[in-house]
Image (cartoon, rainbow, N blue to C red):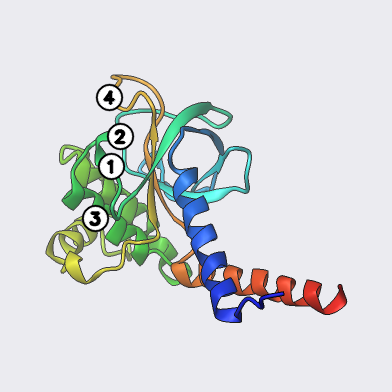
Amino acid sequence: MRRVSVKKILSLATIFIIVASIAAFADPVEARFAGLGGENQNGEYTYPYFLTIDNGPQIAMICDDFYHSSAIGDTWQANITPLVGGDLSNTRFNDLTEYEEAAFLLLQINDANQPEWGNINFAVWQIFNPGVNAGDQPPGTLGAAYWLNLAKTADLGQIDFSNIMILTPTDAHAESGDQEFLYVTPEPGTLMLLGGALLGLFSQRRRFV
């Protein structure tokens, strides 16, 4: 019996994972608004919004769409568009630079700057809708204008957006309806680790057969 090399098995496992990930974006999914993270600035709930996709685990997302509305418990059909190489015609705003600016701000969010989360979300809203009023700057924070300027002046070509996805209602251009969100998926390295795990399982199976 011809032996299959470990390298070939790992390559095939990685290809399978990538192909499966791409296929997952091909058809609409069911999005569900599961809950809020409790952040509220000037009367508006801000990042994080927790959503599920096809009844999967809750994912923290940022809303980029100020003038539509979603409520906890809402479910709707949505398209998932990868920011890198995706067909932006399925998105609400169809503007690569604006999505990259918003994704850049999403990538700035971390546990250490939680007081800025509201400012960052307002800056994202202002990218797509400049007329959005961020209201009073919360004391001790940098303010939405700071984050908006940071996004506008960043060298976006140096940023890795490969793990950013856009979740858009299938009726993207309806005057009313649910909102659009951006979120972060596991990085490509995580997929490689999963491929390695599959390889490990394969090796264990061969050992005990």
Q: Which type of secondary structure does the marked residue at label 4 adopt? A: loop
Q: Is residue 40 left or right of residue 4?
A: left
| Residue 201 in view, yes or no | yes
Q: Percent from the top left, x then y, of residue 102?
A: 27, 53
Say which of marks 4 and 1 sits in front: 1
Q: Residues within 10 Å of mark 2 (few under 14, many from 20)?
A: many
Q: Name the residue under label 2.
A: 90
Q: Mark 4 points at which residue?
A: 173
| The C terminus, quarter of image | bottom right
State the image quarter where residue 176 is shown. top left
Q: Where is residue 194 in the image (x, y as percent from the top left)?
A: 60, 68
Circle 4: residue type: His
Q: Residue furthest top?
A: 175
Q: Residue at (35%, 43%) from the top-left corner? A: 42
x and y, in percent, of residue 144 in the image? 25, 55
- Helix, strand or loop status at disc 2: helix
Residue assigned mark 3: 100
Q: Which mark sits nearer the N-terminus, 4 or 3? A: 3
Q: Nearer the viewer, residue 12 or 112?
A: 12
Residues at circles 2 and 4 in contact by the CB criterion of under 8 Å: no
Q: Which residue is drawn at 60% across and 80% down?
A: 5
Q: Give the amino acid at mark 1.
A: Asp
